[in-house]
Image (cartoon, rainbow, N blue to C red):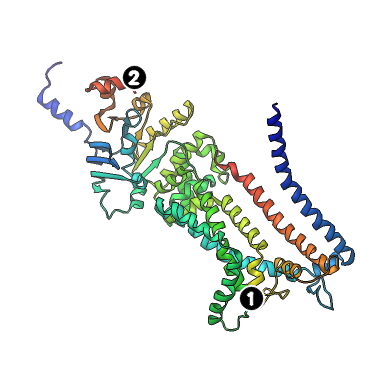
Amino acid sequence: MTTKKPIDALVETLQEPKKKKTIIEARNVDVFYGAFQALNNINLEVEENSVTAFIGPSGCGKSTFLRCFNRMNDYIDEFSIKGEILIDNKKIYWKNVAVEELRKEVGMVFQKPNPFPKSIFDNVAYGLKIQGIKDKTFIEERVVKSLKDVALWDEVKDEMKKSAIALSGGQQQRLCIARTLAVEPKIILMDEPTSALDPISTGKIEELMFELKQDYTIVIVTHNMQQAGRISDKTAFFYMGDLIEFGETKQIFTTPQKERTQNYITGRFG
Amino acid sequence: MKFSEKIIVTLLKFAASITILTTIGIIMVLLFETIAFFKEVSFIEFITDKEWTPLFAQKHFGILPLVSGTLLTTTIAILVALPVGLTIAVYLNMYAPKGFRKTFKPLLEVLAAVPTVVYGFFALTVVTPFLQSIYPDLAGFNALSAGIVMGIMIIPFVSSLSEDALYAVPKRLKEASFGMGSTRFQTSFKVMVPAASSGIVVSIILAISRAIGETMIVAIAAGQQPRFSFDPTVPIETITAYIVQVSMGDVPHGSLEYRTIFAAGITLFVFTFLLNSISFWIKKKYQEKYD
């Protein structure tokens, strides 16, 4: 490598993309289920408009951690959390936070497709309707846009009144993503969104995530290491409630710093 | 097959056939006596005449007053039981702490175990005087207090079965709704209740069917005056109350008056049979909605 002239180095610094804004920040997060400690002192930052993957063996706490970001763990008895989670610089576990408002900013897609037993249209319109929006044209436009965003529109445009339960698994999952997009959250949490789907549907959803990160921040929990490698910008490896390693996905998969990470991604355990 | 096994199988078959034979027997008796009744009274008169006076000198055989009395008390009962029962079900399922649900639900079901004669006297001696203090023109025997108390009696039918239906809704729908930023109230009434609607409808139908067949409360508190009217403040008579009245009286066996109770009985049977069939059909049709 030749030595650079100082001026070139300066040009490079200027051209280097500005560091992205941090949208999720976890500070010293401990999570307990009763006496059992599920997460130990987790510190992690997620950048805006990126895909972050959480990987690790079952029971390592990655789903628990993901569900802290929209406080879905609130419904579990004996759940308690210490430390702080900030979304857009606001503490979400502060007692005055309206959980309903938080969840409009932080949408979630679940492991198993869970459309409501309602029509396709009503599924996507649900989030808008519960916010009290009554403007029909606005709702219709938003529904169509969301379905187009998930590439489902062409498949369902003639049967918007049909029950969503009648769709295939892959279509249902894209519908659930559309339902989340319709309320325009900032962040989308995905809890193993493709684990119940066939490879073709999985491919479609992975492509979709690539598109979505232009406008949204995505955090995904996945058991599928190739998937994490394909779609994410950053990867966090969890083991037994500890965040073992967190960094650029490329680095984690090619030159992991910790032995545990290496053993996991090479399939030596898990 | 071993000999002892054969005996057991025969005994089991015998036990099963007893229930079926009893049902058939009841239907046969109802049918034969009803046919004999309709040999003397025209079917058209039975379903169109607005007076029911088989025990008087001037005899009329119109079932409508008894049907209207039955429908009136049943409607009042459902108006009480449905909102209260459904609210309890939603509260237990969506709001109450887990431990509370476990203790409260069996307690509520005790309501169904109170002897109906107790409810009857409760209606007559507590509810009616109370209602009279608000509305003095209320008759001592009336459809209103009988209906209200009957409604209280069937609350557990609605609440318990509806809660079972809500409990059976997959957890992932609740999560989806909360995940979208819905409140508990929105989740309850926009997702959970619609998703459990078939079970809830079945619970209501069964409650209606129970109310239609209920005898003691109406016999004690609603009066014994067949009247084709939907005024809840005056004495009326239901189909069941009429049957009690005649069965306990000294009507000669085999007379036309005696046969009226079978005609009334079969009317009642048709109602409850239809309702039970509808609920069975709904259950079957919508049962496998979620995998």
C-alpha separation, residue under disc 1 versus residue under disc 2: 78 Å
**Left or right of A151, for residue B207:** right
Q: Around disc 2, counting alpha carbons within 10 Å, would you say few (fewer than 14), some (14 to 19), or many (20 or more)?
A: few
* Residue furthest to the right: B39
Question: Residue A136: horizontal and vertical position, in percent?
Answer: 49, 55
Q: Looking at the rendering, which quadrant does residue B239 occupy?
A: bottom right
* Residue furthest to the front: B4
Quadrant assignment for the C terminus of chain B: top right
Question: Which residue is at a point 29% across and 26% down the rendered structure image?
Answer: A249
Q: Chain of mark 2?
A: A
* Residue carrying label 2: A267
Question: Which residue is at a point 10% across and 25% down the rendered structure image?
Answer: A6
* Residue carrying label 1: B142
Quadrant assignment for the N terminus of chain B: top right
Question: Residue A43: horizontal and vertical position, in percent?
Answer: 22, 37
Q: Looking at the rendering, which quadrant does residue A5 occupy?
A: top left
**Left or right of B178, for residue A5:** left
Q: Nearer the viewer, residue A180 or B275?
A: B275
Q: Around disc 1, counting alpha carbons within 10 Å, would you say few (fewer than 14), some (14 to 19), or many (20 or more)?
A: many
**Left or right of B261, for residue B287:** left
Q: Nearer the viewer, residue B148 or B291?
A: B148
Q: Is residue B205 above or below residue B288?
A: below
* Circles 1 and 2 on the same subunit: no
Q: Could you say which disc has been placed on residue A199 in the image?
A: none
Amino acid type shown at disc 1: Asn
Q: Looking at the rendering, which quadrant does residue B31 occupy?
A: bottom right
Query: Which structural element holds mark 1?
Result: loop
